[in-house]
Amino acid sequence: MNPLAKSSDPQILKSSNSTFRLLVFDLDGTLVDSRRDLAESANSLLAECGRGPLPEDVIGRMVGDGAARLVERAFATAGCAQPADALPRFLAIYNSRLLKFTRPYPQIPDVLTALAARAPLAVLTNKPLAAARHILDGLGLGHHFPPARVVGGDGPFPRKPQAAGLLHLVAAAGVTPAETVLVGDSLIDWRTARAAGSHMCLAGYGFGFEGVPTEDLGETDHMVEAPADLLTVLWGQSGV
């Protein structure tokens, strides 16, 4: 089997869709394009410290491990020492502009509506829960994700790529990891799915996709190049 089962190969994609009873999504770079808000927030903090801005795409590649790691990476890339209060300062800036430019990726609202009719949906993100909830609700996506099915990076479970948060969602849904697919755009998401023993669907359109070792993807891994392709990957359907 092709280790990268793409949406253009319906015979492969339809071979396992009946096993998917829980669909878990990453947030940034998967459901929503938040790169500009994250980048401008990080650059605002760097400017306060007398440093010039970093390119948006460079900061986008720093996202995925939580805000603390994003801040560390931004200061390291800018070549200056990180102030002791850098993280709370970044969070204050970012929380004031969560929805300034952040939007769902094209087709995501319709794709979620179609998928929600077939299986429960959940979110697993390293973003703080309050910020994740604010974005989901503010963009009209929150009704697909009840509070119990959204796990943030500041809750009782260790952040991705640790599997505890994903396994919690699996257990709460009464399914098995083998009946679960994690949809995400980054190496962090792929490692999380691996650790939990779940299927993985990589969002090749997301800003965290660069750097994923596609040569190491396995038989249970899939990749989509646009959100609408999820319908083909998960249910053997096309269109929204």
Image (spheres, rainbow, N blue to C red):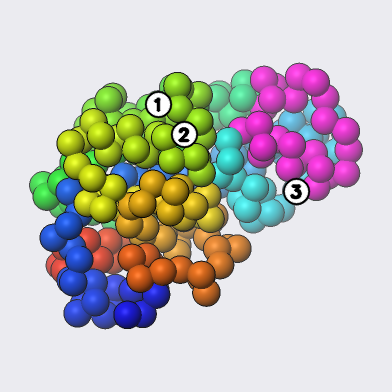
Q: Are marks 2 and 1 in contact (CB under 8 Å)?
A: yes
Location of residue 155 (image quadrant): top left
> Could you tell me which residue is drawn at 52 percent across and 60 percent down?
209
| SS type, badge 3 | loop
Q: Nearer the viewer, mark 2 or mark 3?
A: 3
Check disc 1 and report the residue beneath it.
Answer: 134
Question: Mark 1 vs mark 3: which is more N-terminal?
Answer: 3
Residue type highlighted by circle 2: Leu
- Residue ID at (31%, 45%): 24
Do the CB atoms of the residues marked 2 and 3 lie less than 8 Å apart?
Answer: no
Q: Between marks 2 and 3, how big is the CA–CA gap?
A: 21 Å
Name the image quarter holding residue 9: bottom left
Which residue is tagged 2? 99
**Three-letter amino acid code at the position of disc 1:** His
Percent from the top left, x then y, of residue 39?
64, 43
Segment colored magenta: 67-90
Mark 2 vs mark 1: in front? 1
Q: Which mark is residue 164?
A: none
Q: Is residue 104 above or below residue 223?
A: above
Q: In the depicted view, which residue is nearer to us: 116 or 15?
A: 15
Label 3: few (<14), some or many (≥20) within 10 Å?
some
Say which mark, if any, is on residue 54. Answer: 3
Relative to 38, 127 lies left or right: left
Position of 54 with respect to 152 (left or right) is: right
Residue 26 seen in this snapshot: yes
The reply to whether dot 1 and dot 3 touch (C-beta < 8 Å) is no
Give the residue at x 88% y 44%: 79
Q: CA distance from mark 2 to mark 1?
A: 9 Å
**Hey, what amino acid is under mark 3?**
Leu
Local packing at callout 2 (Cα closer than 10 Å; few below 14, some 14-19, many 20+) is some
Which callout, 2 or 3, points at the residue further toward the start of the chain? Answer: 3
Is residue 78 found inside the magenta-colored segment of the image? yes
